[in-house]
Image: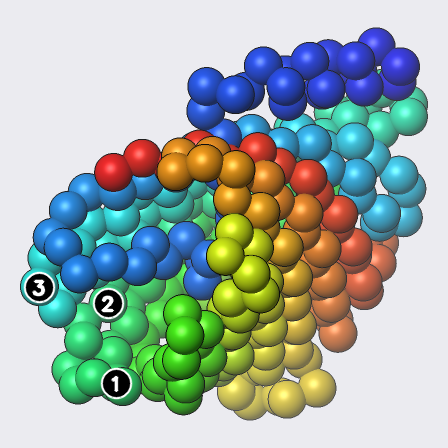
Amino acid sequence: MKSLLLIAFAIFFSSLACSQVVNIENQRIKGDTNVWTGKIKLGATYVQTSSELLNLTWNNHIQYKKDSNIVLILTDYNLSKSASESFQNAGTQHIRYNRKIKERFTLEIFTQAQYNKLLNVNFRWLTGIGPRFKLLQKNKSRIYFASLYMYEYEELSTPLIYHRDHRISSYLSMTLNIAENVRFYNTTYFQPKITDFNDFRIYSQFDLVFNISKHFAFSTAYRLYYDSQPPEGIVHRTHYLTNSLIFSFN
């Protein structure tokens, strides 16, 4: 474990050439110009599930904006190692399209593929559509609310089980401009099964981001994931604490 920690911190500090910040809401790069933009992140994470893990993350984000249209493409890969030296892997590919209809109303369409061996998910595919509303925008601070229909296909590993569910994916997102170079982000998702609201998931992420320069920033993030009906042998609640160096380009 000591050698892994040394490797993790060596990679972290050598990542001054490239790094980024995760939550989908946090990935929305604001601007009025039609342009390709992006971020890259390399991070070290302490994870508490039923055991303690050290998690290394690599994330890429690309955004394209043209007039009232925005396309987001996100890739998230995680490599985890426990005290017993066993490796676990997780990965996500997410594509989201936004079409601004009015100043405070946007249509969202998304699709996502992922796997997570820690959570016993061999493969999960999501797709959804719905409205997104701007509730507040003042002095670079913003609050949004959305409620989307989501279809979910899921394959669990042990035992091998298949799920095909219809869910609501609602979220409340805020960005607060605390100081000139400091921003606070929070997004909380609530995803109940349409036919059974006792089957739900909650995901909340809190980020504090310090801008170092035009292209570099440092982020501390706390994430909470809760599943009311997790796969067999998996805990209901998972916590993540992450420190990351961010590199942005445009």
Check the image and report above or below for 143 versus 223. below
Callout 3: helix, strand or loop? loop
Query: Relative to residue 6, is residue 84 drawn left or right?
Result: right
Q: Quadrant of residue 71?
A: bottom left
Query: Relative to residue 100, is residue 6 drawn left or right?
Result: right
Q: Residue 48 or 69: which is nearer the viewer?
A: 69
Q: Quadrant of residue 207?
A: bottom right
Q: Amino acid at mark 1?
A: Phe
Give the percent coordinates (x, y) of residue 92.
48, 44
Mark 1 or mark 3: whose residue is earlier in sequence: 3
Direction front: furthest residue: 180
What number of labels is visible?
3
Q: CA distance from mark 3 to mark 2?
A: 11 Å
Q: Give the residue pinned by disc 2.
A: 98
Q: Is residue 154 visible?
A: no
Q: Local crowd at mark 1 within 10 Å, few (<14), some, or many (≥20)?
A: some
